[in-house]
Amino acid sequence: MKLKNKVAVITGGNSGIGFGIAAAFEKEGALGSIVGRKQAALDQSVASLGSNFIGINADVTKMKDLDRVFKDTSSKFGKIDTIVVNAGGVVEGAELGSIAVITESDFDRYMNLNLKSVYFTIQKALPYMRDGASIVLIGSIAGHRAFPGQTVYAAAKAAVISFARGISLDLLDRKIRVNVLSPGTIDTPVFGKFLPAEQVDPVKNMWVDLIPIGRIGQPSDIGNAAVFLASDESSFVVGTEIIADGGVLNMTILK
């Protein structure tokens, strides 16, 4: 019970990696809120997590929504011990491609979700957080390596990795630690957002061939690592990054 009675807020916690983190937190004794924009998914996720978690329907790109998230969580559970800034990823209806095709609107929407919202999620949370709290940002190996069509997304994630260093320095007087957890390829519903159903499994298998450990990651893999960063076990870990990618960045396999 590494997070027993710790109050947590997990943005994007209603599906995929976010729900994997929420489930791992609940297993370790945490309570708090998950945040998402789709009410049906929120309701289903809260039902799975049990009575220690509530769902808050909010858009993390809207400042008033962020204010409400932390006010409502604190009103119900008290001071917040940890936040996981997970909301981000593919922006529905916005182009993800090369510099030749990205519009200013596409650029702004990707940066608003994957970078601006991260900064202001932290800022809005601060009045409700305990001194000595932990903030876990979800980055990506895309912040370290170029992938086709992901330049804008990757730039946002590289900046998120930088945030962990700078914001940790900003918050030293409150002993609030900020770290980044950067996943590789994880088995989530995101594949179905940009691929026809018949292509999902072949694309997943293609990624497996590139992962030294020989399997695609699961949301629980990220959840377990997030528990460590949120817990007192990582009290000497600050302003840095854990990469959970099955060895993609640091190892090369030959077949």
Image (cartoon, rainbow, N blue to C red):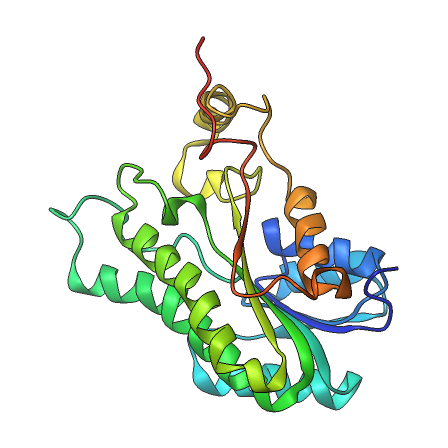
Residue 19 picture quarter: bottom right
Q: Residue at x 51, y 25 (%)?
A: 211
Q: Which image quadrant: the N terminus?
A: bottom right
Q: Residue at x 84, y 63 (%)?
A: 50
Vertical position of residue 102 compared to residue 130: above or below: above
Q: Which image quadrant: the C terminus?
A: top left
In-front residue for pair 31/130: 130
- Which percent across, then down, holds residue 128? 64, 88
Furthest residue to the top?
255
In-front residue for pair 24/45: 24
- How many numbered dots are placed on residues in this image? 0
Furthest residue to the front?
236
Residue 85 picture quarter: bottom right
Q: Residue at x 34, y 59 (%)?
A: 156
Would residue 103 be found to the left or right of residue 134 on screen? left
The reply to whether residue 106 is in sight is: yes
- Which percent across, then down, holds residue 216? 58, 30
- Which percent across, then down, holds residue 173? 58, 86
Q: Residue at x 64, y 61 (%)?
A: 40
Residue 103 picture quarter: bottom left
Would residue 189 be found to the left or right of residue 233 on screen? left
Would residue 152 be found to the left or right of residue 53 on screen? left
